[in-house]
Structure formats: structure tokens, C-alpha cells
Image (cartoon, rainbow, N blue to C red):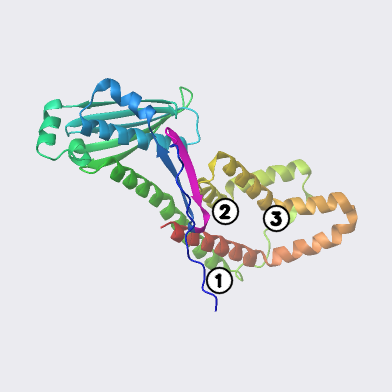
């Protein structure tokens, strides 16, 4: 039996380094995405004029690298600002990012306390920062509201704080997705168990076939706005699309795709009638009667399937 090939392909390093670059990467097999930030002259130009003590310069350089990493990942026009405010020797760090070529940063620190930390051998990132908070702000201009996220600094590094922030941020939509999924499954099971309680269509539903096009449009809009099942399904779709890391273009593609699929049950009969005319009346009437008889079963099945998908994707994200 032939032994599988397990050698990892490698390549020789480049002869010249590429400073001041941000390189995204994507490992599809591991469902892993990220960015590699390499800064040279850009961070040197920020640090050199201030003659910071080495530990402070190192800490501010880490803040700049973290800000560039996060700022280039946000697909917006505007500013991304990272700021710390703590009780340690380095009281404040501020990094203002507009694009990879436009980054400003500064540090405010107590020179005597920093010197004492260096002399005592305790000039680590956590010791210099102390306790306080890390704020990350997105400013898209005067026409939009600022978005700001806060995370506590409890004697750890900037890296620890960033990990904690994104861990907490990811748990919220995951828990919401799990809760909505479980609710969908429960509602679907309840609808299945009560499918025999209502066997006759409401009178108002039987009158829909006599509506004019304008009236039908008004009823359709009303059903979308007040029908709990439609609201739940649209909310589930919005949750999945909104929490997916697909960028602005991907969100628009997903919205259009969902709109087409969700409206296909209406669009297909309309297209069929537009093409074939009265010849499809009998088939459409049979389909209408079948859907009326199986309405509860179809609704229950759809809710359970959507609920299972939400639970599955939520568990995968944990």
C-alpha cells in the first residue's frame, strides 16, 4: 500500500523584506482567515521624534500594529481609533488610523514610574498599562454616529484585551443564533402537533382570489409587516447575513439571493401565468388547494429545518 504524502511544502524566504505591508490570508481547509502586519519605516517615523523609553516605544509600536491590523480589516471610509486609559505608568496610548499610509500615534506616561519599572525589571506590557480600559472607535464622519467598543484592561497586554473583546463580541450573535434556532424548532414542532386543529381556511384568505392587483399588493405588504411567521423567518435571515464575515458586497449578494429565493413561491406562478396564460389555471388551482391542505405541515417543516441550520451554525461558531 502506498504511503500518503505528508511532507509540508516549503519555500525559501524572499531576499528582500516587504515592510509596511498588510497581507491577508485564508486557509479554507481550516476555516481560518487572518492578516499579517509588518511595519518598518511607518512605525519608525512615529516613534523616533519622541525618544520614548524602549518599553514605552515597544508598547506603542504594538498598539500601532494592532490598530493597523484591525483598521485594514474594516471595510469602511473613515477613521479607526484605538485608545487606552489606565492607572499604570503609561496612562494613555492613542493611535489614529485612516489608511496604511496615514497613521498617527502618541503615548502619555509618567517618566519616573516608567524608570522605576525598568529598574525593577517589571516593565512588561501589563505592568506598564495597569488597570483601565481599551476603547476602539469607528468614526465615519459627521453624517454618521460613532461606534465604540470597550474592553477592560486588568493588568494584561493589548493582545489579551483584543482577544477578550472579540471573544465577547462573537458570543453575543452566537447565543442569539442558538436561541432563535431553538425557538424555531419549538414553534415548528408545536405547529406540527396542532396541524389537525384547524382544517378550514379563514374566510379572509378565501377572498384573496378576488382581489385586484392593487389590493393584492397592499395585502402582501401588510402580511409581511404583521405576520409573525414571516417576521421570524426574515429575522433569522437577517441574523445569519448580518453575522457573516462576508464584507459589504457579500451582504448585498446574500440579501438579493434571499429575496429571490423567498419570493420564488410568488414569482414562479406569476411567470407561469404570464407565459402560458389560462392554460395553467387548472394546475395553479390544484397547487393552491394542495398548499392549503398542507399549509401546517409545510410551515412546521420549514421552521424546523431553518431552526436546525441556525443551531448547527451557532454550535460551529462556539
Callout 3: SS: helix
- Report the residue at 85% width, 58% height from top: 281
**Mark 2 — residue?**
233
Is 314 left or right of 89, judged from the image as shown?
Answer: right
Q: Which mark, by number, is residue 205? A: 3
Q: Nearer the viewer, mark 3 or mark 2?
A: 2
Q: Position of residue 102 (x, y in %)?
A: 43, 25
Quarter of the picture holding the C terminus: bottom left
- Report the residue at 15% width, 26% height from top: 111
Quarter of the picture holding the N terminus: bottom right
Magenta stretch, residue numbers: 18-29
Using the rendered image of the protein, determine whether residue 254 is visible from the camera's viewpoint.
Answer: yes
Note whether 77 is above or below 280 in the view shown.
Answer: above
Say whether residue 269 is magenta: no
Using the rendered image of the protein, determine whether residue 105 is visible from the camera's viewpoint.
Answer: no
Q: CA distance from mark 3 to mark 2?
A: 21 Å
Which one is earlier in the sequence, the residue at label 3 or at label 2? 3
Q: CA distance from mark 2 to mark 1?
A: 20 Å
Note whether 181 is above or below 221 in the view shown.
Answer: below
Q: Nearer the viewer, residue 136 or 21?
A: 21
Tell me the crowding category of disc 3: few under 14, some 14 to 19, or many 20 or more residues within 10 angstroms, Cα based.
few
Q: Which mark, by number, is residue 67? A: none
**Mark 1 — residue?**
193
Amino acid at each position: 500500500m502506498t504511503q500518503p504524502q505528508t511532507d509540508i511544502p516549503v519555500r525559501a524566504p524572499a531576499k528582500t523584506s516587504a515592510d509596511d505591508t498588510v497581507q491577508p490570508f485564508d486557509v479554507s481547509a481550516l476555516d481560518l482567515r487572518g492578516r499579517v502586519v509588518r511595519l518598518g519605516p511607518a512605525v519608525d517615523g512615529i516613534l523616533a521624534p519622541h525618544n520614548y523609553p524602549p518599553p514605552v516605544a515597544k508598547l506603542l509600536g504594538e498598539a500601532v500594529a494592532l490598530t493597523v491590523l484591525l483598521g485594514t480589516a474594516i471595510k469602511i471610509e473613515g477613521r479607526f481609533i484605538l485608545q487606552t486609559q489606565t492607572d499604570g505608568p503609561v496612562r494613555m496610548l492613542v493611535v489614529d488610523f485612516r489608511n496604511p499610509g496615514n497613521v498617527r500615534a502618541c503615548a502619555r506616561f509618567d517618566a519616573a514610574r516608567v524608570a522605576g519599572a525598568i529598574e525593577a525589571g517589571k516593565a512588561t506590557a501589563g505592568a506598564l498599562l495597569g488597570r483601565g480600559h481599551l476603547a476602539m472607535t469607528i468614526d465615519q464622519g459627521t453624517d454618521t454616529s460613532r461606534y465604540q467598543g470597550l474592553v477592560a484592561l486588568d493588568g494584561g497586554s493589548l493582545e489579551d484585551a483584543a482577544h477578550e473583546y472579540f471573544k465577547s463580541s462573537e458570543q453575543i450573535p452566537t447565543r442569539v443564533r442558538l436561541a432563535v434556532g431553538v425557538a424555531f424548532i419549538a414553534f415548528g414542532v408545536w405547529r406540527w402537533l396542532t396541524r389537525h386543529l384547524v382544517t378550514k381556511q379563514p374566510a379572509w384568505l378565501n377572498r384573496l382570489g378576488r382581489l385586484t392587483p392593487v389590493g393584492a399588493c397592499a395585502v402582501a405588504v401588510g402580511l409581511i409587516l404583521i405576520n409573525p411567521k414571516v417576521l421570524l423567518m426574515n429575522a433569522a435571515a437577517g441574523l445569519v447575513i448580518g453575522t457573516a464575515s462576508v464584507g459589504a458586497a457579500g451582504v448585498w449578494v446574500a440579501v438579493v439571493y434571499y429575496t429571490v429565493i423567498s419570493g420564488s413561491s410568488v414569482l414562479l406562478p406569476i411567470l407561469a401565468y404570464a407565459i402560458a396564460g389560462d392554460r395553467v389555471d387548472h394546475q395553479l388551482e390544484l397547487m393552491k388547494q394542495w398548499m392549503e391542505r398542507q399549509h401546517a405541515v409545510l410551515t412546521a417543516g420549514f421552521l424546523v429545518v431553518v431552526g436546525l441550520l441556525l443551531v448547527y451554525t451557532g454550535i460551529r461558531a462556539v
